[in-house]
Structure formats: structure tokens, C-alpha cells
Image (tube, rainbow, N blue to C red):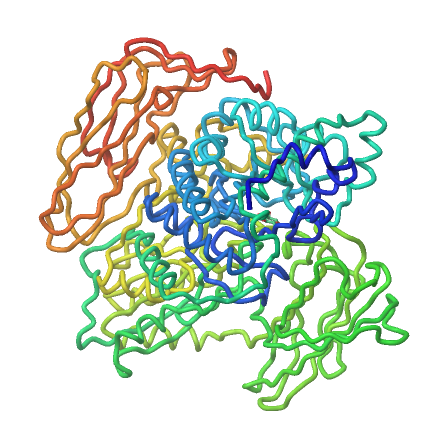
Amino acid sequence: MAKPDIEAILDAMTLEEQVSLLAGADFWTTVPIPRLEIPAIKVSDGPNGARGGGSLIGGVKAASFPVGIALGASWNPALVEEIGSALAEEARSKGASVLLAPTVNIQRSAVNGRNFECYSEDPCVTATLAAAYVNGLQKGGVGATVKHFVGNESEIQRTTMSSDIGDRALREIYLPPFEAAVKTAGAYAVMSSYNRLNGTFTSEHKTLLTDLLKDEWGFPGVVMSDWFGSHSTAPTVEAGLDLEMPGPTRDRGDKLVAAVRSGDVQAEKVRDAARRVLTLIERVGGFDAPDIPGEQAIDKPAHRALIRRTGAEAIVLLKNDGILPLDLTGRTIAAIGPNAEAAQIMGGGSAQLNPHYAVSPVDGLRALTSENQLRVATGVTANRLMPLISGPFEVDVYGRSDFSGPVIEHQSHPLGEVMWFNAVAPGVADADFSLRATTRFTPSETADHVFGLVSIGPSRLLVDGRTVVDIRETWAPGDNYFECGNREARGTIALEAGRTVDVVVEYRFVQAIALNLKAIRVGVAVPLSDKAFAEAVELARASDIAIVYAGRSGEWDTEGNDLPGLDLPGRQDDLITAVAAANANTVVVLQTGGPVAMPWLDKVRAVVAAWYPGQEAGNAIADVLTGAAEPGGRLAQTFPRRIEDTPVETGDPRTYPGKNEHVIYREGVFVGYRHYEKAGIEPLFPFGHGLSYTTFDWGSPTVDRPAFDGDGLVTLRIKVTNTGARPGSDVVQLYVEPPVSRVDRPAKELRAFAKLHLEPGETAEATMTLSARAFSYFDVERNAFISEKGRYWVIAASSSAEPRGSIDIDLTREVIEAVRARFSR
Ligand code: BGC
């Protein structure tokens, strides 16, 4: 079809039609206007796959890719671009032409529940990878939605909290990833965050959405709200929020038409927002292919291979005394720990999806070992919630809130967890229903069983008619389901092996809390005993090698909830210590969405951080452990020794997690390594750290313009040789150290990096460029990036703590890059 004439379409539209475009039709699609042949388009989460429509759980199967923190640790923009292209194919297989990704918030805190989704504590890493992701995705014809704009660095009360951030920290730390995604990569959409910024909801923040994003950065795309994150009619439209999501509208429609008619909202604002939505539809090919295709599960070998390769390239070898790579020949292996047989492939929240499959670490090893070689013991558990009951649930919905009257709908749900967006059944008001969900459970042992119940609204759980958990009176929102579900309530009942029982949940709803979500979740287990712990230690003692698969899961690393601290959950530290005492060849594989404390570090021979690497998790981990692949990752977030060492968890609630609905980013630009260096605190593992199976020699850096006047770019080069016997990759990290400055600046800041893959004996040159911005700080008074005249050190390093060479650059004049938008004074 010829390119649609968007101005002509706008002219032909009534005000009502223009307004109708400015909110979703439903959870994932926009409103079509058949009269003018304007199609609907569909969006999908995001970011580590394309989940498709429907619920967060149990949807059509999709490829599960490594999560953001893993991509961050790859330090490889070319690879991230490939992931973006693969995700474009995935999105299309779900009928979606816009992906709600990437997440480019900064890992400000060590315990943010959503750190797993973000790339790094550093804006340079985040910005570079964000632009690569957007490029890959949009080359594939699918629009990116960079999120969450801005200041969503914690999940605690995220829908009401104000992130109070000064202009300097905004400009230097929190905005650059968005700036790169928008200005360098041309992202088609931006999602405002749930939180407020300096007191104003970002969805109503005119300085942010219009003055900065649209005017200063020249963003021609769509700003959409986070789901239910738009709270008003005129203020959001006037501020520059184009699209209210999800639909159907709550604040627009007739209300917005009336606001335009009464003069509260300018018609031109509505037209501009409609123009942006039409432009998005056009850019993703909506006018050419107006029908949204059905969802398909397409499990592609090429995606499998890419996910496996990326998984290994993201794994960080934190410590190795030479035991890795493992030689498995003729040796017995104990695979121990809660994450040995459980495949931890992704984080929780809206980023989760129904994967095509999930390879556990034990599956990965089994493929490489004989039956007698590999034995498994869980030892301890690490779950936050009781393990999900298998389901299915048969649900009777009543049209009254007291479980009386006729059943108005019967539903079957395949899992032990059921979620409903909007109404539980067509036409049923939230205040007027109750439901009874029934499943059957057959215990495999005779023991006390602990049941766990989470629901969004009051409920109780009965086993064969006996009430085991009752939160009908006590129910209160807690740390589940995006702060809408209660903290799991538990109850115990003795059950007999083989005797099937009826498990019933009675549930009703009180009122919509933040998200219009309803849910119930039932878990059950027999708690692991000390015997299980002892058996795991005995197995370690009787084996040649002990690998402990420890860490967390998407129950911990999840949207809607921050982590309680840096300690591994449950008795995992004890288990690792005991296993290491029993077996001198102990290796720890960590799977988390961020740093953890390691009190046992000196006692084990090797540690790798494997994150949540997607559906090929176990294969990628086995590849690295055995040397089939090298550990290509470097930390993109500092691992501190103790929580008190971090920039924000200092015990003052004002800096974390917030007090009186304000969290003050008092550390300013001193986030991550910038903080540790300023405070003189040695972390457990520094930013940028990661060992290799081979060795590299670095030449001295050279610079093409040692006297740089700030115009254009200055190029730095450094030769790297693989001096070992294995192929491997190394990351050259370029930090700029400023001269004495009029402001307090970080000791040094990462401004460029390059990853090189080298065969044994091979030499290659890392080439990196810097612009004047790389030398700058943001001057709040002058509202400008200022690069002071003077001599700067450019340090080539293999981590923030490991310089390998340096060269100085003389900036021959002061460079001023004035900006327009101003947040505060
Ligand atoms: C998340 C977004 C997500 C949206 C749609 C929100 O809860 O913050 O990242 O894209 O839901 O699922």
C-alpha cells in the first residue's frame, strides 16, 4: 500500500475518533477505526521474549531469552542487536508489532526486584546495549518501547513513590540510556514509569515528556503509560502522554472530548498525540497488514542456538583457581542445591512468559555424563513461596459475593495459579462475585504438608473440607502480585501418601488496587528436613567434584517486590560451607538477578554468576563449566561485600526504600563503582570484573588526537593478543579520569568499551571513540554539559579496579553543550 497520508487522515477524523486512538482497546491492542481504514496494532511484553496477549502465565509458548542483567554482562552490543532481531521474529509470531522493551533503568540499589531486567549500574553500558537492542528489534520491523521513563529504580510502592532526583544525576546517570535509545537508535515508543519524579507522576510530567523527550531530543514517537500508570485526563494529555494503557480507557474517551470542548485541553495536543499513534501504526507496517494474526508458538533452532551462545557469553567467572573448565572424564560429580534440578531461566513479573522448554543445570550435565557419574541432591530449598500445586483448577463463579446463588460460569484453568485481568467472567462486576476453585492433590509421602495461599482479595483454603489457611478477615495487600496480593499465608495439615484430597479455594475481591488484576495461587510441600541437608553433604563427600547450584528465582527477582537483602535465601550459605568442607573440589554456580554476599568464597574453588539465561540455561551453564564455551561475561553491576556498603541501602529510609512517599537519590551521580571509589570501599567483585579461561596481553593505548578541541570524535586504539591456548574474549573498558574540577566528580567513569573474541595467538585492535560529552559533567546552574579544559587520563582497564594502561588527552578548550529542559533549580 502507498504510504498513508497521515495529515489527510487526521483531517478526516472527528475529535471523537482522534481521542479514541489515545487509549488502548484492551490490554494489548490499540483502537481500530474501520471507517478510515485505521487498523489496530498489538503490543507485547517484553523484554526477554514476546509473551503475547492473555495472562502473565500459561500463555502460548514463546522463546525465553537471557534477561537484561545477563545481556548487560555480555558487554556485547552486536550480540544484543542479534537478540533484538530474534525478538522481532518472536513478537511477530505473537501478532505483536511493538515490544514493551527494553528496560533501561539503572541498577541504583543492590536489591531492586527488577535489577534482573535492567542492564547495568552504569549509563554507558546501559545506553550502548539499549541502542543495540532497539536497532535489532526495529530492523526486524517491530517497534521498541523504552521503559520505564524515568526513575523506576525500586519496586517498593512504585505506583505512588516519588523518585527525587537532581538534574545532574538525571542528566549524567538516569537519562542517557533513554537518550541513546531515542536519539541514536530512533526508538518508536517510550513508556512512562509508575513512579512520580520530583513529586509529579511521570505520566503527567511535562518537562520530562514534552520539554525534554519531544522538544529537546526531537522524539517523534509515542509515549505510552505503564499499565494503569495514567491517572488523569487533562494533565496527562497536556504533559505529552500520548497513549493510555491498557484499554478500555478510564481517563480519556468522553472525558477527553469534553475537556477539549471546554478548553481544558488544546485540540492541537490531541491531534499531535493521534498523529504519533498513526505514525507508529505506519512505521510497524500496520496499514499494509491490517489484520492482527493469531498467536503461534514457533520454536526455532536458530533461536535455541542464539540463546545458548548468549547464555555462555553472559556468564561471569568470578573466581577460579584453575579447577574450571572441568575435566569430567572418569570423575564422579555431585550436583547439589535448590537450582540444580530446577531450571531458573527468567525473572518474575510482566517479563515472564511460558517458555518452549527449560533446560535445568542437571539436564545440561546429564547430556555430558554417564548415568553413574552424576548424582543429584537438593539439600535445601530457596523458594520464597511454597512450590506451586500442579492444578488444574476447576472454578465455579457466583454472581454474588457470598458464594450463594447459581453458578454463573464454570471455568477450567490448567495451573495451580489463576490470574484474571479485568472481570473474572464476562459482565461480572468486581464487587459482586465470589468463586470456588477446586483441584485434587495426591501426596507422595505421609507427612505434615504446608500449604501456601496468595490471593488478591480475601480467601481461604480447605483440604477435604477442613480450613487450613484462612485470610478472609485478615487479608491485606503484601509482597505478591505487584503489591496487590497478600504476603503468602501458610497452614499445615498431615496427609497420607497416595490418598488424594480435594483442595478448594474460596475467593472474592474487594476493590481494584493499582492494577485491575485478580489472582489466586496455591503452593504445597513437605519442608525439606535436616536429613536432606546431611544427604547432600554426604553426596559431596563421596564425589570427585561437587557443584552447588545456588541462588534465587523469579519469585525473588521480580517486578513488584524488592529483595530482602544480599544473603542467599534459606540455608544455602550453610549448605555451600558444609559441602566445601566435605569436598575440596567445590564449585558454586550462582543464578540471581544481582549481587549476593558470599561468606564461603574462600572455601570454594570457583564461582560463576550465570543469571537467568533463558530456556537454554542448563546447556549454557554446562558449556561454560566444561569449557565447550568460554565464560564471556563481565559484571555490569558491582558485587558489594555487605549491604551497608552500597550507595543507597545505608540504613536511612529516605535514600532507600523511601519515606513519606519520597525516595531521595541523595548519592547523586555516585552510583555503583562511582560510589565505591569515592567512599574507598573495596567491593567483593568490582564492576567490569570477569575471569577468562585464557590470557590476554594488552598493548599501550594510542590516541589520534592527543590535543582534542572537543569537535567530532577522538579515537583510541589498543591491541589485544590472546596469549593462551584457548579461544576467548576480553572486554577493553575505557574510563575517563577528569582533572581537578570545580565540582565533585567521580574518580573515573566508563565512557566506551569494546569486546574482542580472539583465537589462541590472535591479535586484534579495539577501537573506541569519545566525544566531548565523554569528558563532561552536567552543570545544573548553566543547564549544560561542561567539559572543562585540561588534561584527562583515559584508562584502559579490565575492571574498574584493574587498570591495564592509560594515556592522557588534552582538552584544549572548555566545551559547553547547553540543553533546554530543566527539572529543578
Ligand atoms: C510493567 C511494564 C509492563 C506492563 C505490561 C507493568 O506492570 O511495569 O514493564 O510492560 O506491566 O505488562
The answer to whether residue 759 is left or right of residue 332 is left
Vertical position of residue 431 compared to residue 221: above or below:
below
Does residue 555 show up?
A: no
Does residue 740 show up?
A: yes
The answer to whether residue 65 is left or right of residue 42 is left
Residue that appears at 36% across and 72% down: 362
Which residue is farthest bottom? 498
Which residue is farthest top? 813
- Nearest the viewer among 366 and 294 is 294
Residue that appears at 82% across and 38% down: 255
Quadrant (top left/top right/bottom left/bottom right) for the C terminus: top right
Residue 226: quadrant of the picture? top right
- Nearest the viewer among 446 and 759 is 759
The picture places residue 102, in percent across and down from the top left corner, at: 49, 45
Vertical position of residue 549 compared to residue 376: above or below:
above
The picture places residue 121, in percent across and down from the top left corner, at: 42, 38
- Nearest the viewer among 194 and 54 is 54
Residue that appears at 45% across and 38% down: 646
Vertical position of residue 190 compared to residue 341: above or below:
above
The answer to whether residue 126 is left or right of residue 402 is left
Which residue is farthest right? 405
